[in-house]
Amino acid sequence: MPPMTFGTDTGKNVLVADFLDQVEVELPVLGDHARLTLAQAWNESELAPYLADTDVMILFHDIARISEATLAAAPRLKAIVRAGVGYNNVDIEAAGKRGIVTCNVPDYGSEEVADHSIMFLLALARQLGPCDQSIRDGKWDYKVADAAPRLRGKTIGIVGCGRIGTATALRAKAFGLDVVFYDPYLPDGVDKALGIRRARTLDELLPQCQFLSLHCYLDSDSYHMIDARALAALPRGAYVINTARGPVIKQDDLVEALASGHIAGAGIDVFEREPFDNEQLRAMPNVFLTPHSAFYSREGFVELRRKTAEEACRIVLGQPPRNPVNLGYLVEPRTPVTQPRARV
Ligand code: NAI
């Protein structure tokens, strides 16, 4: 299939690497300033024909990784705009060393992901699964909800208190939950500003939590952070919610903890391998599964595409991007960037 090309030939080329098959949101933003090509690729090798003359790459989530080899084959590439919050599918260090800025869109779906986490929490606590199933089985007995705890006063532990963690904490407070977070990278005072408690270590957090909700990004530190040892540190009967990234939990260890009954249930939107392929987890009744859909709302998705196109447009026009994520690695940037102001 020939590539789909839109916009104006101004000498600047924006490549949408994956996922999009139409441009009704992007064209009004970028169409006068650049030629826009949709590659609809599923892996890096399918991008090869476009790399020589790409100035800005927009990347969704179908391509597992943009690695050094792809960056090396893109001599004009100034920036990669990741259409999403997480950017673990880009080698941001390799990009930075080549002067390529990597940006994300940090704020289009914070509320949706927080809503999704609370949806899991309520569904698990209120025994939605067994209640719904019992009626479908022709029964009528409130005692199927026997395990339901009262929420007020129970403790929810939040790992990663950034945008989504904060939005989740505020929602949890409204239900009377006692909120405690662990986030080693935040300065002192966040707990006071939000009116929640802080744990200084994961080991301090876990034994307190009837609910554990994950909101950190995925990196080498958070990879498999929630493993058998961490799960064992949660009280028996705790619930685990993951809308962050699959590999933050060691999935096999979670399956074991669920099977043993130590973990009472889980709500999971993100998995070690996507698309989802874990038959043991699929068969478990005490688990809610969603297809990495926590980010999505109709309005939020349009906002994501518009903000992605706007960031790409700023770079095409030689303006500094708003949301660079690899300034720490950036050497001789190929496009202007604004360094953050020192905190006072
Ligand atoms: P953010 O950058 O505002 O917050 C992340 C927080 O995690 C930061 O405060 C950081 O200090 C903390 N953190 C990092 N490593 C940690 C660790 N090892 N232990 C404890 N805390 C740690 O990001 P935001 O917007 O809140 O998003 C969080 C994550 O949610 C994203 O990185 C992404 O992976 C995931 N996400 C999932 C979506 C979905 O559809 N399921 C949609 C959007 C984001």
Image: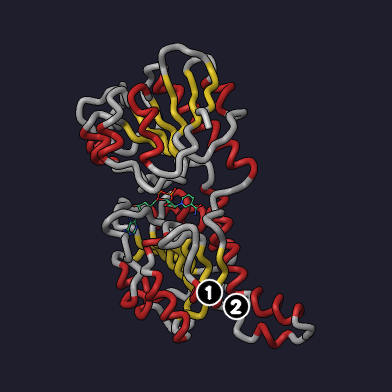
Residue 150 is labelled as: 2
Q: Is residue 110 above or below residue 22?
A: below
Q: Is residue 239 above or below residue 243?
A: below
Per the image, label 1 sits on a secondary structure element best described as loop
Q: Position of residue 184 (x, y in %)?
A: 29, 57
Per the image, label 2 sits on a secondary structure element best described as loop
The answer, for residue 17, to whether it is visible in the render is: yes
Contact (CB < 8 A) between labels 2 and 1? yes
Q: For the residue with label 2, is its CB less than 8 Å from the closest atom of ligand 1? A: no
Q: Which residue is pictured at 56% across the width and 61% down the height? A: 290
Q: Nearer the viewer, mark 2 or mark 1?
A: 2
Q: Which residue is pictured at 32% across the width and 65% down the height? A: 224
How busy is the neighbourhood of tag 2: few (under 14 within 10 Å), some, or many (20 plus)?
few
Q: Which residue is pictured at 38% across the width and 19% down the height? A: 319
**Which of the 4 quarters of the picture holds residue 81?**
top left
Q: Position of residue 275 (x, y in %)?
A: 49, 58
Q: Which residue is pictured at 53% across the width and 46% down the height? A: 109
339 on left or right of 173: left
The residue where tag 1 is placed is 153
Q: Is residue 157 above or below residue 274?
A: below
Quadrant containing the C terminus in the rendered view: top left
**Which of the 4 quarters of the picture holds residue 125?**
bottom right
Q: Amino acid at mark 1?
A: Gly
141 on left or right of 331: right
How busy is the neighbourhood of tag 1: few (under 14 within 10 Å), some, or many (20 plus)?
few
Q: Amino acid at mark 2?
A: Arg
Towards the viewer: 110 or 273: 273
303 on left or right of 181: right
Q: Position of residue 253 (x, y in %)?
A: 37, 75
Towards the viewer: 198 or 132: 132
The answer, for residue 342, to whether it is visible in the render is: no
